[in-house]
Every structure is written in C-alpha cells, then in structure tokens.
Amino acid sequence: MAAEIHSRPQTARPILLNKIEGHSDTVNKAVLIPKEDGVITVSEDRTIRVWLKRDSGQYWPSIYHTVSSPCSCMSYHHDSRRIFIGQDNGAVVEFLISEDFNKMNHVKTYPAHQNRVSDMVFSLESEWVVSTGHDKSVSWMCTQSGSMLGRHYFTAWASCLQYDHETQHAFVGDYSGQITLLKLERQTYSTITTLKGHEGSIGTLWWDPVQRLLFSGASDHSVIMWDIGGRKGRTLLLQGHHERVQALRYLQLTRQLLSCSADGGIAVWNMDAQREEAPQWLDSDSCQKCEQPFFWNIKQMWDTKTLGLRQHHCRKCGQAVCGKCSSKRSTYPIMGFEFPVRVCDACFDTIKEEDRTALATFHEGKHNIAHMDMDPSRGLMVTCGSDRIVKVNNSSLKPAYSCMYSGCVGCTLNTLKLIKPLPFC
C-alpha cells in the first residue's frame, strides 16, 4: 500500500525560549545573527548591543556601544559583518563587527537626512545605502565614497522601505497611506507608480523577490498583498488584527505570511490557499437593495417623504446598502476577513459553512511588537518593542509533511515539496 502524503502546516503558538532585558528605552530593531546564537539590538537609549547566548542558556552582551543620538533602525549584512545604524538626528553610521562578535569599529558616518531615519537597506551588489526619513525623503548613498547619489521627496513622512537588489527598485511607504515605487539610478531616478489601498499610515513593508510580491501593513489594522510580478494590479486584503500592523515576514518556501501588531498579536496567514480580491466599494445615492435614500439624497427624501438612511457597504459584493439590508455579520476568509464583517442579507445567504473556514491562525506575543525578524531554517523568531524587552521564540513554522499510511508510527519528512507518494515508510 502506497503512503499518502498530506501537507500539515504547523500552527502551534510561538514558544518563548529567551527573554532579553537590560534596555532603558524602546528597542526599535532586533535581528538574529545567521549561523550564530546571537541577537543584535538598537534602541532609543542610544545603544547598539550584540547579545550572544552563553553556556548558561542566557543572552549576555558581547558588544555594548553608545552613539550620540537615539538609534531608530538598522541594516545588518552578515557575510561582510557590516552594520548600518540609522539615528534620530538623521545620520547613518557604519560599523564593522569582528569575527568573534566582541568588537565593533567605526567606518563612516553618512549625512543621510535632516530628521529621524525611519528605515534603511544596505545593498552589497551596488554598494549603496538606501534610507527613508521623517524629512519626507528617500536617499541613496555610495558606501565606497560616502557621497550622496540622489534624493526624492514625498508629501508625507517616509516610514518604511523595501529594496529589490537585482533591479534597483525601491518601495517606500509613507504616513499618508501610499506606497511609491521608484527606479533608482546612480545620479537620477524615475517614479514608476504609486500604490493606494490603505486608509492609514504604512507601518511596514516586505518584498519577496522570488514571486515578486509586496506585502504592506498599516495603521488601519490591515495587510495588503500586491502582486507586482503579475502586472494586473491584483491585490489581496487581509484583515485579522485589532491594532496597527508593524512587522511583516513572508516565508516563500511554506507560503506563509507572518504579521505582528502593536497589541502583540501575531497572525500566520496561509497564502497557498485560493483567495479572492475584495470588491471595490460602489457609490450610490440610495440603497442598492431596497432603494431607500441615503441622508444626503435630499431630493428623494423630499419626494418620498422619508428620512435618509446611513450608507454602509457589503464586504462581499461591495454594494452600497442601508443598515436594514445588511444586518448580518460573517467571516469570509477567502477575501481575507478572518473576523465577522458586514455583509448584505443576499450575500450572507450565499456563504456556506465551509467558506467560513479560517485561513489564518492568531497568537499572542504578550508584548508590544515594533519589529520582528525570523530565521526560518532554525525556526526562530525575535520580537522587540516599546516595553524594552526582546523575546526569542521558537516560531514552530517549519514545514512538515506527514505520512497517513495506517502502518506508519510517525513519519515526518524534511522535504518542502513531495509530489510522488512513498511506496513504504
């Protein structure tokens, strides 16, 4: 009898492995050191710290370096051991970390911005540092000469950044809720497009260069997936958080998206499932179900001698409806609605029970999460935030494939894609 292989993604909650304490102010970023039991943190307390795991199982700082201004962001390149620190005064400082992670030497200081640096990326391929700041700009600088190559200004604070190293495209999110795609050149740039979909400021971006997908999280509590590679303007809306989304990570091999919010919520979205785009909301002067006027439709109110009604929208069909015609609530995970949302009565009757099956799992990080980093190969996740605590968790998100053959006592394969069934275990 052949063994039947079923994909069973692990959805167990993150398990706390270590808690790193010692900062006196908000920890703005924490990253895991690849191939090392270590974490690098930067904080509002003006410190850069490298924490290594000791024989006792606890993390202790092997590097404790203080700079002149609060540290707002960081970009670490492990192969070259170069680390770039963005500061509240607008400067970007480059350091070189020793091989034993016990010493850090200053290399250059870049006058990147006139105000707080909000995000940055170092590209070894082009030897550029690309950064965004609260001076409403994105800048790119040459790390060889230390000179400014270009700058572009926005109408709002530039809050977050992602960069495609191969094509030199930059995605910049801002406080107005827009995402701007720029093509950067050595002495010039061009604006490709502007993505609009969020109703709040963009808090975080994640770019997957393999599938060419862009993910954005915002203060409107939502996540949007933008299919850049498809070139058809396809977007998927994901709603499951109750606070602003501040961290994202897409695991390309397992087709899972992790999102973290300010209230400590951690969502794991199954992006391998068939999903539908949420419809555009329609405009109308009267309910598109019962034809009763909305409160601004004075002419129809006068003609029918009725009071105007408040306008709502069905999340499934997008039609403008009144409260009476949309009295039902339902989850609809296919469109990304993981908690009950308003749907019109007609659409509610079309939603089957299997349509309500959740396509995401939700967990509690138990602290404010301002930033998150992952090492999928080791199943590790680190989170940090305004409570000054850094948590190292076992993410439990490694892909597992289990054999359903009745004679197997427990077969787990470390294969990401297994198409042919096994003849035996």
Image: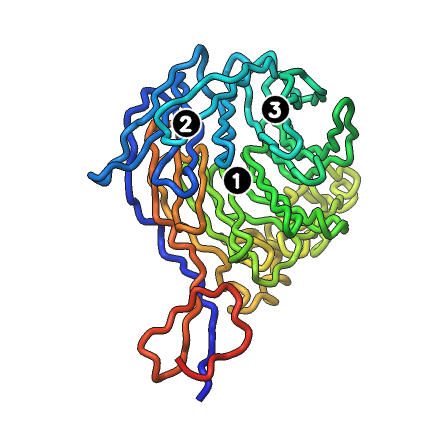
* Circle nearer the viewer, 1 or 3: 3
In the image, what residue type sits under mark 3?
Thr
* Circle nearer the viewer, 1 or 2: 2
Instruction: Pick whichever of labels 1 and 3 is earlier in the sequence.
Output: 3
Q: Position of residue 175 (x, y in %)?
A: 61, 27
Label 1 – label 2 distance at C-alpha: 40 Å
Instruction: Pick whichever of labels 3 and 2 is earlier in the sequence.
Output: 2
The kind of secondary structure element at disc 2 is loop
Whether tag 3 and tag 2 are in contact, CB under 8 A, the answer is no
Question: Which label sits on residue 221?
Answer: 1
Label 1 – label 3 distance at C-alpha: 22 Å
Q: How many marks?
A: 3
Residue in the picture at 31% in, 27% down: 62
Question: Which label sits on residue 132?
Answer: 3
The answer to whether residue 198 is left or right of residue 167 is left
Residue on which the image places disc 2: 98
Q: Which of the 4 quarters of the picture holds residue 137?
A: top right
Residue 292 shows up from this direction:
no
Label 3 – label 2 distance at C-alpha: 28 Å
Question: Considering only vertical position in the picture, is 211 above or below 383?
Answer: below
